[in-house]
Image (spheres, rainbow, N blue to C red):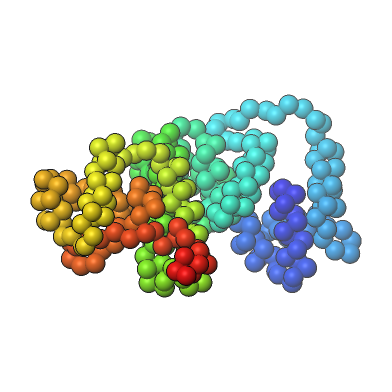
Amino acid sequence: MTHEDRRLIAAWLADGLGYAEIGRRLGRPTSTISREVTRNGAPSAYLADHAQETARHRARRRKPTRPAEPATDGQPTELMRGFVDEFATLLAATGLPRMTARVFACLLTADAGGLTAADLVRRLQVSPASVSKSIASLEAMELVLRQPDPGGRRERYVIDDDVWLRAWKADTGAHGEIATAAQRGIEIFGADTTAGARLGKMGRFFALLSEQMSGSTLAESVVYDALTVLAALVHARRPLTLDALAAGLDWSRDRATTALDAIRHRPAIADPLALRVVGPETYTHTTRPDRLSPAQREALRK
């Protein structure tokens, strides 16, 4: 048990929580919490620093200091288990549920063959239901894969070498969608409103984040076509349909559609202009509503 675990136990005990609830929050059995408070608590109350020092002294009395022994039969050593708990605490601080963080840390430090649900239950000393729920969350985030167990009918859970690339792409796509949604919100609430100003700042932040994370993934020709579409809309000074754009530029409909989609999905391409849909397959241009603040817009109207 880590020092941070003991701080949480002390705080929750002071709030009046029972051992069972504390155990659920930490992903530990009720008996573990009860034993921790009984063995390492002070006479008058459970204090985190006192409990940490008591546990350290007990560990020193129990066995002399020596290098960590290697794992035997694939089972982790005490030092390895301590690392998993500490690493899970760091992951939980990023917003990942603590039980899910413990399962992920356990799989992250497992052999290439991964672990079964029974392995996770045994190593983490938690219920099968807790493991099942955590695995479902990790699969939804594409952080864990299922593989058949060669030696039986059970499935094994593994973390492969592409996990970070998948997580990176998922975050990049989500950031782009947030930026696009913020643009729609500005059009609904108005750029001069408080909500519009907030959405504008958020949209700029997530658009920049998406651009930085994804890099230049569009072909140069597509970016060039997107800017050509904007130039056509500025020159026309009126809304144009998709067919009118394609005909005026002497392009196929597919090429014009690809250029329009590039602007919609990567608004930064058009900065400081923006694409505006005014009807079925009908487009015009406008200035990006988040480029100027409400105060700047008001001053420029005068």
Question: Left or right: 149 with respect to 3?
Answer: left
The residue shown at (20%, 67%) is: 279
Q: Nearer the viewer, residue 249 or 104?
A: 249
Residue 164, position in %: x, y?
45, 39
The answer to whether residue 140 is seen in the rendering is: no
The answer to whether residue 62 is seen in the rendering is: yes
Residue 268, position in %: x, y?
39, 49
Judge whether 13 appears above or below 101 on screen.
below
The residue shown at (60%, 36%) is: 76
Residue 283, position in %: x, y?
23, 61
Which image quadrant for residue 16? bottom right
The residue shown at (12%, 50%) is: 248
The residue shown at (11%, 45%) is: 250
Judge whether 260 appears above or below 115 on screen.
below
Which image quadrant for residue 180? bottom left
Count the labels in the image. 0
Q: Nearer the viewer, residue 64 or 277?
A: 277
